[in-house]
Amino acid sequence: MTAGDAPLPEVSLEVLGADGALAARILGFQPREAQQGMAAAVAAALADSATLVVEAGTGTGKTFAYLVPALLSGRRVVISTGTRTLQDQLFHRDLPLVRDALGVPLRAALLKGRGNYLCLQRLGAAREGTPGLSTAQQDALEQVAGWAATTDSGDLAEAPPAARRPDVRPRITATAENCLGGQCPRFSECHFYEARRRAQEADLVVINHHLLLADWVLRESGWGEVVPEAEAWILDEAHQLPETAARFFGLGLSARQLRDLARDCLEDYGREAGDQPGFPERVAAVTAAADSLRDALGEGDQRAAWPQPPAAELRRAVTALKGALHDLALALAPLSERGLGLARCQQRAEALHQALCRFDEPGSGDGVPWFETQGSGFWLRLTPLDVSGPFRNRRAAAPGAWVFTSATLAMKGDFSHFADRLGLEAPRTLCLDSPFDYARRALLYLPDNLPDPDASDYAERLVAMARPVIAAAPGGAFLLFTSYRVLRRAAEALAGTLDRPLLIQGAAAQHELLARFRRAGDAVLLGTASFWEGVDVRGAALSTLIIDRLPFASPADPVLQARIQAAEAEGISAFRHLQLPHAVITLKQGVGRLIRDADDRGVLVIADPRLTRRGYGKVFLRSLPPMRRTGSLEEVQAFWQEGRDEVSG
């Protein structure tokens, strides 16, 4: 089926209607007015090469709403998602459904970043010439080699678990820094370049935001491009774009990069040279300097502004690391002709040295210098305060239709915060509420007996409030926290006191915790930042959602501090224009975990008294779905009795 001579919006509406192609081919498909409205708006934007921003509430069916006009438009389209998981879901599940229903002979391709594909050259080198590997590492490499003989895509999402080992994956994947490119002996077999070739030939390409932004940076640096040119760009989960752009348009240097360089230097040296006096000592000096810098950054995990000026110990550590990288680059220069691996190591050493020098002495427009530590690792970053200019420039270099969509982009229907952050000038906008019946199937409980979230006994009081709420529900409870500190204290207070499973973030991988949560049906799951979005648990397994406090970003965050100072210097209210919109959108993301299906019922608890005691609380409340509100535990219990009466009736 194609659009033919009929306008694309009209055809898209027909396809998504009660008698349309999707209803005829997809079991259980139900037409939705909001979905049709979004599809018509996307179709019009594609036809006009316009910029469109759409907030589509949970249950709208936004994926089909943009896929239908994209497939019928006849244009070359790139679709970008927020995560690789969503990317796989879109490409392997949603896209084939719509394409088959429409009968469109469209070539589609899936493209991920280089590090998501098996590198045959590095796998072979690791198996043949890497001294000191443990038996477990060798066994893992052999498992990967067995899979390598059968895979067509080389996509590590399909690989055996051995490929995900942190001490194996860097040995079987390439990065932009260590990839040998066209000079690689196995270039003709390269899975990444084959995926890239398919993307260049495709009518529709599915990527993710990290790849999109990384590609833009590569183009700016003159290293070529990975993502193909297109006539239309659809960016799903677009609320993530401002922060993702800030990361990529800035500068970053990590302990892992330094340690990976050292490892590759020694392994390539052993294979390609091996006779340069003092070379291993030059490599060891880089590792030692990186370790000294980590020590100088202080104990524990932290995220803080780079001190100005740095303390003497920190100053010495940075100077030593710069010297060690410079010396290593010099030592690699005569060895670079011995082999491609050492040549690439020299380029990496020089690039890391230049990045550290730039971080140590940033220019006026380079951004905010800050650091982060976690375990034995560290990151040094320069983050721009404003990405609207670079983002606008990149879009200008890729003319065509641009569609930005997410369940959370607006504050009270106003998209100006999102549009300003990305430099979108007068875009078309559309705000679509969720079609779910929140008024009947959800209840907002605002307990009135809790202290301020900063009170010393807040975590214990929160748990005391939560116990009867959890007990009243027929299924499981999801507790979302804004900090690990409060989560840990709540976990301690709940441990050993529940008659149901208690699952705590960090005890296992996120996907495993969610699988256990779904299987149990009545578990209590405690999570922080990474659980606020992308979690889809339907049915009674998630009956209660408890949010500990309004998710204002920490004022101690170094980038936020700098943005606040810059806003206030211009006479702009940082709270009203930066902090409040960000918190509202984040809260909407969290609340979106509760009702995931038309048949779901749920109780939302926001355990922050500021919601009713502060004037800005009204802004949050007006941005939430329309649901009944109560301050009474008895009404929570009655809500669940209503649900039982519905079932029995």
Image: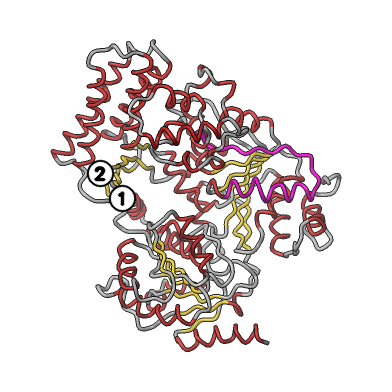
Residue 583 position, x and y percent, is 43, 62
Q: Main secondary structure of the magenta part?
A: helix
Label 2 SS? loop
- In screen coordinates, is 580 left or right of 51? left
For disc 1, the marked residue is 558
Name above or below for residue 119 compared with residue 313: above
The span from disc 1 to disc 2 (Cα, nearest Å) is 8 Å
- 110, 41: nearer the viewer: 110
Residue 110 part of the magenta segment: yes
How many numbered marks have been drawn onto this rendered protein structure?
2
Q: Position of residue 88 (x, y in %)?
A: 60, 46
Seen as rendered, the residue at the extreme right is 5
Does the rendering let one see residue 455?
yes
Give the magenta part as a residue range: 86-114
**Closer to the camera in the image, 328 or 10:** 328
Q: Earlier in the sequence, mark 1 or mark 2?
A: 2
Q: Are marks 1 and 2 in contact (CB under 8 Å)?
A: yes
Q: Which residue is mark 2?
A: 306
Question: In this orientation, does residue 44 appear?
Answer: no
Within 10 Å of the Cα at label 1, are there few (<14), some (14-19), or many (20+) other Cα atoms?
some
Q: Position of residue 156 (x, y in %)?
A: 53, 39
Labelled disc at residue 362: none
Image quarter hosting the C terminus: bottom right
Element on which disc 1 rests: helix
- Seen in the picture, residue 270 relative to 252 is either above or below; the reply is above
Give the amino acid type for the residue marked by disc 1 in the picture.
Pro
Q: Is residue 377 magenta?
A: no
Percent across and percent down for residue 503 are: 41, 65
